[in-house]
Amino acid sequence: MKRAHAIRRSFAVLFVLILIVASVLQNPTFWHVETPQFEGPVHSTSEATAALNELKVKGRAPKTGYTRSQFGDGWESILGCDTRNEILRRDLVNVIVNMDCQVVSGMLHDPYTGSTIEFQRGPNSSQAVQIDHVVALSDAWQKGAQELTPAERIQLANDPLELLAVDGAANQQKSDGDAATWLPSNRAFRCQYVARQIAVKKKYRLWVTQAEKDAIIRVLNTCPEQTLPAGI
């Protein structure tokens, strides 16, 4: 009797298990395997990107007629203080200035290389720190500056928005390159660098090439909240 009862109980348990398994198998979510979702590339919607998209995209104009003098005869001077020394005073720390409004020493935390440079005025040392036109003047000439008035070109060449004190060797390496051909080796500064180029081109109605715009977008995709510098 006990044996028969145990058998009936075993069949009951087995029957319940069969019902449970059947119910699970009929559930449409049972066979669903979650596929990992990978995020695509970040696309910047920043102020800098918006301004970039406002710039015209065109090919380079001929370099014919370009000379540095198209942007004025060297640095402008106001009350004896020229633009170069004004930018040195702005960008260096621990600055010492002489009675002629010339920076004689200071220290630069170089944005292009990330290195620190001790600046000492002198025939063999001054070029260690140079003033870079963030948008190279020859690049500007081929992308709209030919259409500016002479006064506007002089303003561009002396505009603090357009100028940075930087490592001399890095400035020489950059030469007249745009973002498609040269970016600072200091990756932490690249977003600020291209944002400043955008700001200058927006202010002076210059354009970009497609290759240049593509290069800038790649940089801005790493900093989707990048703003423009003041001064536009």
Image (spheres, rainbow, N blue to C red):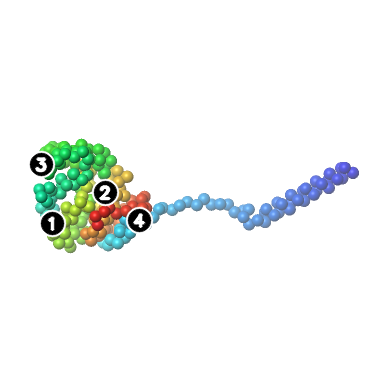
What is the crowding at mark 4: few (fewer than 14 residues within 10 Å), some, or many (at least 20)? some
Query: Which of the image's four quarters has the C terminus?
Result: bottom left
Residue bearing the label numbered 4: 46
Instruction: Decide if residue 41 is on the left or right side of residue 229.
Output: right
List x then y, in percent, for residue 72.
12, 54
List x then y, in percent, for residue 140.
20, 56
Q: Secondary structure at mark 2?
A: loop
Give the spatial CA distance, label 3 vs label 4: 44 Å
Residue bearing the label numbered 3: 99
Q: Earlier in the sequence, mark 3 or mark 2?
A: 3
For badge 3, the amino acid type reads: Met
- The tag on residue 182 is 2
Q: Marks 4 and 1: which is nearer the front? A: 4
List x then y, in percent, for residue 169.
21, 42
What is the crowding at mark 2: few (fewer than 14 residues within 10 Å), some, or many (at least 20)? some
Residue at 37% over, 57% down: 45
For badge 4, the amino acid type reads: Ser
